[in-house]
Every structure is written in structure tokens, then in C-alpha cells.
Amino acid sequence: RETLVARQHELHGGVGLDAAITAAIAACEKGISRIDMLALPDQPEQAADVLAEGARITLRRARKALDNAGSRGEADDFHDLRKAAKTHGMHLSLLGRLWPMPIKARRKAVDELGERLGELHDVFVLRTLLDADDRPLGSPQETRLLTKLLKRSEKSLKKTCLAAAAGLFGDSPRRSTRKLARKVRDDLAAAPREDASAPGAAG
């Protein structure tokens, strides 16, 4: 434990953290500038196409990450899957303003997948530290039980994450976005009719 705490302090106080923070700030500023230039269409069908295209891109990335994680199973593959799940979750938070109930259940499932993938990431990090030749966390005798437990956790979490991700991203991105676009068109087209029929609309 003391070795892990010391290693954590080194990472938090190192130059790498400052560089990561600077890069994150730059990325946020770039995103804000792009939002300022964003122009969305007023027509329901065009708006639906914009939302569907965004969903298609995020789902395609998630499907690719899922395929790689399932076929290769490397730490980087699951890290990409975690990033794709987070991106999809952010997209769902935007879509949730249109129809909260259908999105709410999926958002919960995506968040749960993100939690499991985060746990798996922690396991990968610990195993990397244990396997480090230059600065091991302890002798093989001291870390034998921990290594065994981590391998068991990794196997279980991989299986759980792949099953959950398949349920979310296993469908064709094109098919999923067609459903999304159709739903958005119907809802946006119905909105003016509902406003017109509301009490006091004519007055």
C-alpha cells in the first residue's frame, strides 16, 4: 500500500500531469469555439438528420471498439471502449431533452458499463505496476496472491463488460440511426401540432 501511495504522489506531482491538464484545457477551448460557430437547421427533417449523423458516428466508434475488445482483449482496446461509452453517454444527455423516458434507461446502462470499464482499467493499471521490471511493487512472494486475484477480476470484468457493451452497441449503427432519425422526425413534426392545440394558442 505504501508503495502504491508513493507512486500515486509521483504521478500527481509530475510533469506529465501538467501537460495533460494543459492539453485538456486546449481541447475544451477548441470545443467551445466550435460550438460558437455551430448553426443548426430549423426544419424537423434536417434537424433529425443532424442528430442521427452524430449518433451514427458515436455508435460506429463504439462498435469498432467493441469488436477490437472482443477479438484482441488488450488494455488499450477496453480503454477505447470506455472512451466510446463516455462519448455516447454525453450524446444521450443531449438527446434526453427530446424524449427523456426512452433515453433514461439506455443512459443508465451506459453509465453502468462505464463504471465496470473503469474498474477494469484499475485492474490493468495495477497489473502493469506489478509486472514492471524496473520498479516492482514487491517480491513475487509478496505479490503472488494479489496477482492471482487481479487476474481473476480481469477475466470476470472483461466478460461482464463485453456482454453489456454488446447489448448496447451490438446492433448495426446504420440501423440504430435510422430508428433514431425516424423517431426525431415524428416527435419534432408533432410538436407544432401540439402547440397549436394547446389552450390559449389561438388567442
Image (cartoon, helix red, strand yellow):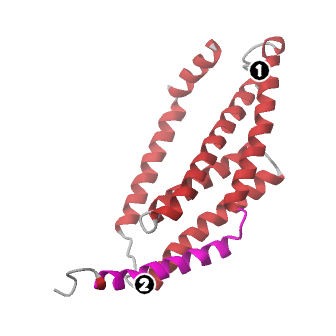
Magenta residues, start to end? 170-196
Q: Quadrant of the C terminus?
A: bottom left
Residue at (80, 47) in percent of width and height: 73
| 10 Å crowding of disc 1: few (<14), some (14-19), many (20+) | some
Verify whether residue 176 appears in magenta: yes
Q: Main secondary structure of the magenta part?
A: helix
Residue 169 lies, in percent from the top left, at: 68, 61
Residue type (three-letter) at the residue carrying disc 1: Leu
- Asked if residue 153 lies in the magenta stretch, the reply is no
Q: CA distance from mark 2 to mark 1?
A: 58 Å
* Mark 1, secondary structure of its residue: helix
One can see residue 170 in this view:
yes
Classify 10 Å Cα crowding around label 2: few (below 14), some (14-19), many (20 and above): some
Q: Position of residue 173 (x, y in %)?
A: 67, 70
Residue 124 image label: none
Image quarter of the N terminus: top right
Q: Name the side, left or right, on which 10 lies relative to 195.
A: right
Q: Secondary structure at mark 2?
A: helix
Q: Tally the numbered discs.
A: 2
Q: Position of residue 68 (x, y in %)?
A: 77, 55
Residue drawn at 72 percent across, 61 percent down: 64
- The amino acid type of the residue labelled 2 equals Ala
Residue labelled with disc 2: 189
Q: Residue at x 60, y 52 (%)?
A: 109
What residue would you read off at disc 1?
146
Q: 26 or 128, which lies in front?
A: 128
